[in-house]
Amino acid sequence: MINMAIAPNLENYEQARATFKWEEAEKEFTWNKSGKCNIVYEAIDRKCEQGAANDIALYYSDGDRDEQYTYEKLQKLSNRFARGLKSLGVAKGDRVFIFLPRTPEYYVAMLGTIRIGAIAGPLFEAFMEKAVKDRLEDSEAKVLVTSPELLERVPLHELPELKRVIIVGADEVDEGKRQVAYQEIMRHDSTPIVEWLDKEDAMMIHYTSGSTGKPKGVLLSHYAMVHMYISGKWVYDLKPTDIYWCVADPGWITGTSAGMWAPWLNGTPVVMRGGRFNPEHWYETLAKHKVTVWFSAPTAFRMLMAAGTEIAKKYDLSNLRHILSAGEPLNPELIKWGMDTFGVPIYDNWWMTETGSSVIANFPALEIRPGSMGKPIPGIEVEIVNNIGTPMGTNELGNLAIKPPWPGLMKTIWNNPSKYADYFVNGWYISGDSAYKDEDGYYWFEGRIDDVINTMGERVGPFEVESKLVEHPAVAEAGVIGVPDPVRGEVVKAYITLRQGFHESDELKEDIMNFVRERLAAHARPRIIEVRNKLPKTRSGKIMRRVLKAKELNIPTGDVSTIDD
Ligand code: ATP
Ligand code: MG
């Protein structure tokens, strides 16, 4: 499938940007000849047809289970599931939501759903009742796939549209309560079944993380596969000989776009680890499967860093080629820690649920600029624009914007077309993030537009201050906000958690404040520091600055359905 002729030489990045066209990448896919497509066919079935049927597509472990799945096995299981869904009356365009722990059945359900042209709605296992209900209601899901434990968080009586609930791992089910056993579904035969679709037909609904407000139901199409394929190839640099572990839960875009589609479209086997975050388990997983490419997020790296390097030293992690990070800004301190601990680089890449896949990246083929998101991937035009959508100059802060369309771009916000329309200004997709571009075309993240602090007429980006704070030996994590001040407009306030062995004191706070003043800027110095046991975060691990701010200002916190407990 991989035709190297279409892969521009990324070492000659500018040339690649000038010459690469998505139409070239499309030639890799079936619809180029037939006009019809299906991402499951491209990611799984076609691999089988091309001689990889017996290659491992998935390694799964969780402490109890330890399993391997070939492409052929995933193909057969998902055919069964697809036929089972059909027997329940599920048709093209129907929403099938998946609310399961991270297990192979999650993938089987995703593949089976999308195979028949239904729309998959992946949910994160840690969601509580309100979050589950909001999403099932908003999407008018027809079928839910869940487990006996998670079923307790599904308020069936409030969800009249939900016709059937498939239960994975139950000995008995209650048909009166619309339940069907997964075993029953899987009794259907495994002969091939694929719904041939137009490339713009819907594939998944992913709800956003809820960092800035109520989560939005982002609708992605099958066409996003081209983008995911190219990200896998260039940004994550995946080869069939790699073993790839993306730790993100499939309930978030990173867990599906970068966790399943990008690797499988590139013929790369993936590792899935069940259970909660635990440094020992994580390092053990890297060692056991001889992982070569590892994709995680800054919050996880900070937790691993806080847990101490000694733990990592106990494991053989010598197979790692490189590490990837997305979801939040990657503090330069983490890149240094990664190099010291693993001896390989951590490459940052920027994107959103709405963009479908990576947009800006520190490509393995480019020089890393620590603290920068990197450069746009070939085929995507990125710009910094002002509030009326006019491009700005080099080194000027403004809205990070993208020229539509590109293959991964969402089709709409489910049930909210006006919200979708709001993203576009003067022909640009406006991300909601603030950033600038340097002389060499690298993009630098400042913060969410709403989080940028204005003090004494100076802009202060929370990310820069947070990154400086975590360089201080006592600071494990930091969340920075602006609080109103009669003289300065706003002043910088930092919420921090301390590393093991450090205790709160006025002296320590003073020392931390001075550390930022001396190494960043006087106006960026936090004037108030509050030590916390933990910071409010989304369940995907993002610091919720708006919650800190709301508490500070004594105003309502807004939607907190995605907050971690
Ligand atoms: P919501 O849209 O519901 O408020 P969210 O924006 O956190 O939540 P996601 O789509 O999961 O939901 O996250 C996208 C956002 O994550 C980006 O807009 C950006 O702020 C942040 N982000 C992602 N990758 C990076 C990165 N590499 N560097 C800096 N920020 C990043
Ligand atoms: Mg967002």
Image (cartoon, rainbow, N blue to C red):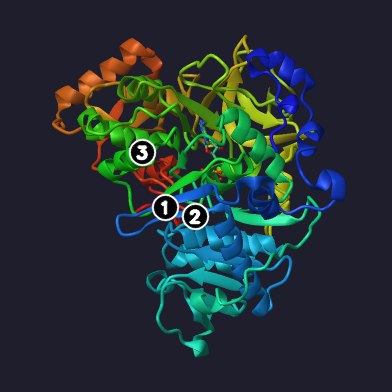
Above or below for 535 versus 493: below
Within 10 angstroms of label 3, few (less than 14), some, or many (20 or more) residues?
many
Does the residue at mark 2 contact the one at mark 1 (Cβ under 8 Å)?
A: yes
Provide residue 437's location: percent of width, then percent of height.
61, 17
- Image quadrant occupied by the N terminus: top right
Residue 69 is labelled as 2
Task: Indicate the amino acid at tag 2.
Answer: Tyr
Q: Nearer the viewer, mark 2 or mark 3?
A: 2
- Image quadrant occupied by the C terminus: bottom left
- The answer to whether residue 350 is left or right of residue 486 is right
Residue denoted by label 3: 286
- The answer to whether residue 556 is left or right of residue 382 is left
Q: Quadrant of residue 314?
A: top left
Q: Residue furthest bottom?
A: 176
Pick whichever, 481 or 99, lies toward us: 99
The earlier-in-sequence mark between 3 and 1 is 1
Q: Quadrant of residue 398?
A: top right
Within 10 angstroms of label 1, few (less than 14), some, or many (20 or more) residues?
many
Q: Nearer the viewer, mark 2 or mark 1?
A: 2
> How far separated are the C-alphas under marks 3 and 1?
12 Å
Provide residue 158's location: percent of width, then percent of height.
53, 78
Task: Indicate the amino acid at tag 1.
Answer: Tyr
Residue denoted by label 1: 60
| Residue name at image x 53 percent, y 64 percent | 98
The earlier-in-sequence mark between 2 and 3 is 2
Pick whichever, 357 or 172, lies toward us: 172
Task: Indicate the amino acid at tag 3.
Answer: Leu
